[in-house]
Amino acid sequence: MRHTYSVWVVGGDQRQARLAELLAAAGHTVYTFALEGAGPLDGVEARTELEQAGQGDCVILPLPALGEGGTLNAPLSPSTYAICDILSAIGSGPVVCAGRVEPALFALADGLGVTLHDYAAREEFAVANAVPTAEGALQLAMEELPVTLHGSRALVIGYGRLGRALAPRLSALGARVTVAARKWSDLAWVRAHGWEAEHSGQLRGWLCAYDLIINTVPAPILDEGCLSDLKEGCLVLDLASKPGGVDFEAARRLGVSAIWALSLPGKVAPVTAGVIVRDTVYHILDELGV
């Protein structure tokens, strides 16, 4: 891995803006595109065209890379850009890294001769990213709940990386924690940590006592039947990526307070989130021998 690179940071939210500044501070030549809303960035040159991006060493697309309707995910830009035009402009020259790449986007990129490296699919990224996601969820819960987390009954659905980050933090704040998981081995670990355990496929009829429910599973979990069990005032946070795990239409009909809290790291800890992306991209470049 070389010491310095020419890097383009294209689209995204505040985590990409902070990523660009972090890369510039490390001595890399950094250009941004579709990040106008972030304002001037230290050591970074903003560009309005991508015609020279193909001459760079690395292009970093956001997480997720794909926005609505086949566009680049660029919430900080007043303009919209078709993702196919972005990829065509980049071409096959640079290493192109993107987050949470869907199969259709992989196929599109392949057809255009662009190889995408999904940094969000890597284990080191997922583990590190669970921490700001968990902290952001706790911050949101404390803002939205009328009671303290201390003494509240909290259910975490899923015991993957994010569930493992959430449960001990809730417990440390004094919440009475239950974890629901699918695997019996996970439930055994949950009990070993001293928390209550429930099977995620057997939740209906057992949800009436919780003040807070946090879902981390990207599959239908909290349907209308489960949501109708909740006591008044229970807060539901869905941290799962699309398609999520909560029937939000049913939640609206039932008057359940439910929030789909996506991209929390970029909202609550953009510098940390930028560091995580930077380090993961470094690992990709090192493995590729660039």
Image (cartoon, rainbow, N blue to C red):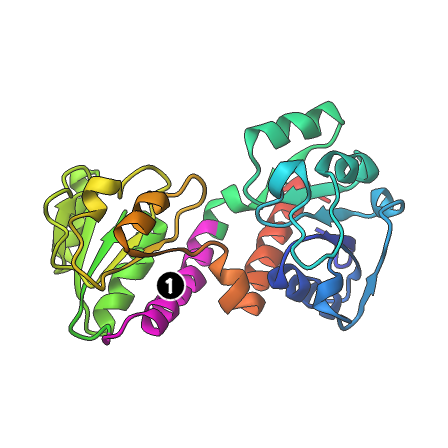
- Location of residue 122 with respect to 172 vertically, above or below: above
Residue 186 showing in the rendered view: no
Residue at image x 63%, y 32%?
A: 105
Q: Main secondary structure of the magenta part?
A: helix
Q: Residue at x 73, y 45 (%)?
A: 290
On the image, the x and y values in percent for residue 93 come to 81, 37
Quadrant hosting residue 143: bottom left
Q: Camera-side residue: 93 or 257?
A: 257
Q: Nearer the viewer, residue 180 or 124?
A: 180
Looking at the rendered structure, the secondary structure element under dot 1 is helix
Would residue 281 be found to the left or right of residue 23 on screen? Answer: left
Residue displayed at 86% across by 54% down: 48
Q: Which residues are magenta?
A: 126-148
Query: Residue at position x 41%, y 57% from top?
Result: 130
Q: Is residue 227 above or below residue 130?
A: above
Name the side, left or right, on which 46 lies relative to 199: right
Residue furthest front in the image: 253
Q: Can I make out residue 1 in this image?
A: yes
